[in-house]
Image (cartoon, rainbow, N blue to C red):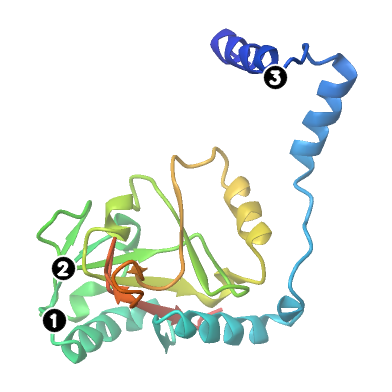
Amino acid sequence: MSTARADILDSIRRSLGRGGLDPATEAGLRQRLSAHRRQIGLARTDKDHAELVDLFEEMAKALSATVTHIPNSAALPEAVATYLAEQNLPAQAVVAPALQGVPWAERPTLELRFGKAVNEDLVSITPVIGAVAETGTLVLTSGPDSPTSLNFLPDTHIVVVNRSQITGRYEDVWDKIRENGALPRTVNMISGPSRTGDIEQTIQLGAHGPRRLHILILDEA
């Protein structure tokens, strides 16, 4: 622990009228933090994986997201082009660099840019680190391959989820994040399009982020 951090924590303990931690208490706290114990989960997540995929789709749709299944990443360009046409949107998008390996050239009419989102971008396409069936929530981490601006600036957010990334509970996704090494700067958990009920208690979509959330589930193994 850095000296500055130790000083801050010591100051907090003094303000609470507490002394420093004895070695035994500190060891116990560190063991508890490193154990990552599971909490009580909802019974609806006690399913096999195929049923968890169905539950994730059900919960995501209940939150006003739309969901489409496609066979594999090779089908992504066609699926994106079809969705944009159905929504009467231009065939343009900013894409997370992590998805550069997709054969986008199969649909040359798509105008794509890889990198961060800017105010003029209407559509973004990103991957996820995981998806939680318990609540229909998408989990995205920040980094050079997936800038956080893609999750919030564009009006339409298209998210690519491999069915193997769908888990029952949040703890399963955190395990995956830890397995990747150092924790990312940002972890975003997204449940449906952005919304608010502040105006006359009426739900309005797109209040603080995308008004459309479209999920493409890749059914490949």
For label 2, the residue is 122
Direction from residue 144 to residue 166 in the image, left or right: right
For label 3, the residue is 16
Viewer-closest of 16 and 126:
16
Could you tell me which secondary element the residue under label 3 belongs to? loop
Direction from residue 47 to residue 160 in the image, left or right: left
Q: Are marks 2 and 1 in contact (CB under 8 Å)?
A: yes
**Marks 2/3: CA–CA distance:** 50 Å
Query: Is 2 above or below relative to 198?
Result: above
Direction from residue 84 to residue 169 in the image, left or right: right
Q: Quadrant of the C terminus?
A: bottom right
Could you tell me which secondary element the residue under label 1 belongs to? loop
Quadrant for residue 205, please give it.
Answer: bottom left
Dot 2 or dot 1: first in sequence order is 1
> Measuring 60% from the left and 9% from the top, which residue is drawn there?
7
Query: Is 29 above or below relative to 133?
Result: above
Q: Position of residue 65 (x, y in %)?
A: 39, 80
For label 1, the residue is 89
Q: Position of residue 32 (x, y in %)?
A: 81, 37
Dot 1 or dot 3: first in sequence order is 3
Q: Amino acid at mark 1?
A: Leu
Q: Amino acid at mark 3?
A: Leu
> Measuring 40% from the left and 48% from the top, which residue is drawn there?
142
Q: Nearer the viewer, mark 2 or mark 3?
A: 3
Q: Quadrant of the N terminus?
A: top right
Q: Amino acid at mark 2?
A: Leu
Q: Nearer the viewer, mark 1 or mark 3?
A: 3
